[in-house]
Amino acid sequence: MKPSILQLNPILVPAINQKLDTLYTMHRLYEQEDKDAYIREHGASIRGVITGGHTGISNDMIGRLPALQVIAVNGVGTDAVDLAFARSRGLPVTGTFGALTEDVADLAIGLILTTLREICPGNAFVKTGKWIDNPSPSAIPLSRRFSGKRVGIVGLGKVGRAIAQRAAAFGCPIAYTDVREMSDIDYRFVPDLLSLARESDILILAAAADKAQGIVDAAVLDALGKDGYLINIARGKLVVERDLVEALLRGVIAGAGLDVFVDEPNVPVELFGMDRVVLQAHRASATVESRTAMGEMVLASIAQALAGQRPEGSLTT
Ligand code: 8YV
């Protein structure tokens, strides 16, 4: 009999789904009307869980899966899994570390360019026929340059470093904050976030959100200042979202490029009409390339765990 796997989020790569279906009996919880009843019926047979970084899994759900041998996160953020709890049960929790770095960094740069250069309103101006109606160059206000701006990165892990590399190619001086100074790179280390915000034109959030909730608040936004931009490709909960909306409404900062939010898919509606705010639906890793590589890592983690091996890159075992 094929082992049973519980999948909490869809995987958008057909080849990965085919492999999963060939190897396992797949229980796709997101397709079920009555999720609670479904777990009651199938929970005892489940040996592996596949979940998204943002979705994770609750301790209650883990408790309902007595035969569970692995939690494979199809992402790099493991903040929605209680790692200490999984560790206490000897359960490996794996992530797709390294598989999505380039695409997440690319989107960060994309958000910077679209926000500072106001590409979205420019696009709408042409596509809605407004340019023909108003061909004067003064019809659209001037935007802001990216090249050479002071970039501050919060979290210099794999993604933070890939963003730094790209921003450096735009001639930007790079500074960063993290729990400690990194000895292997020569970007400027700033120990506290408030100072980093004060010394940056563009503040980019690339940190894990396991412990760092609400670190970007009114004071940090105030320090970033009226010509400053916030970019978030990490987790919505790193930001006090109400403070960010207020700061944008009151011109405390100039704009924001956001891929992630506190309560996805709910996004504060005040942001919708703002030209200097660019929004994405949590899509930084949503390329065929990243999602294929991520899917392969998920497959490998499950195969290793079910074969009684410690999955490569397990965070808890
Ligand atoms: C994914 C993410 O969108 O890596 C993460 O932590 O949040 C994203 O890359 C998500 O995990 C896909 O399921």
Image (tube, grey):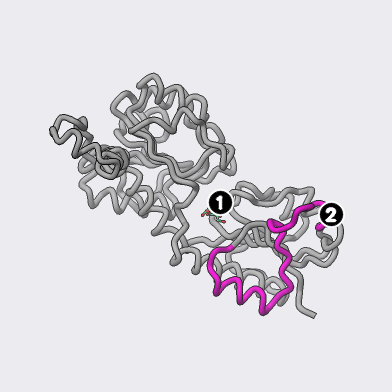
Is 119 left or right of 66, judged from the image as shown?
left
Residue name at image x 75 percent, y 66 percent: 69
Q: Which mark is residue 77?
A: 1
Can I make out residue 154 in this image? no
Q: Is mark 2 within 8 Å of ligand 1?
A: no
Q: Position of residue 280 (x, y in %)?
A: 44, 45
Are the residues tagged 1 and 2 within 8 Å (C-beta)?
Answer: no
Screen quadrant of the N terminus: bottom right
Q: Is residue 28 magenta?
A: yes
Is 67 left or right of 14, judged from the image as shown?
right
Reading the image, the residue beneath label 2 is 37
Q: Position of residue 206 (x, y in %)?
A: 44, 45
Q: Label 1: few (<14), some or many (≥20) within 10 Å?
A: many
Q: Is residue 24 magenta?
A: yes
Picture quadrant where residue 221 is located: top left
Dot 1 or dot 2, earlier in sequence:
2
Residue 168 versus residue 196 in the image, above or below: below
> Disc 1 marks which amino acid?
Gly
Between 43 and 41, the residue placed more toward the observer is 41
Residue 100 versus residue 197 in the image, above or below: below
Q: Secondary structure at mark 2?
A: helix
Between 125 and 76, the residue placed more toward the observer is 125
Residue 303 versus residue 148 in the image, above or below: below
Task: Give the residues drawn in magenta, as a range.
Answer: 11-38
Can I make out residue 148 in this image? yes
Q: Position of residue 148 (x, y in %)?
A: 20, 41
Residue name at image x 48 percent, y 45 percent: 234
Q: Is mark 1 within 8 Å of ligand 1?
A: yes
**Disc number lying in front (1 or 2):** 2
Residue name at image x 82 percent, y 65 percent: 67
> If the picture is divided into quarters, which one holds ligand 1?
bottom right
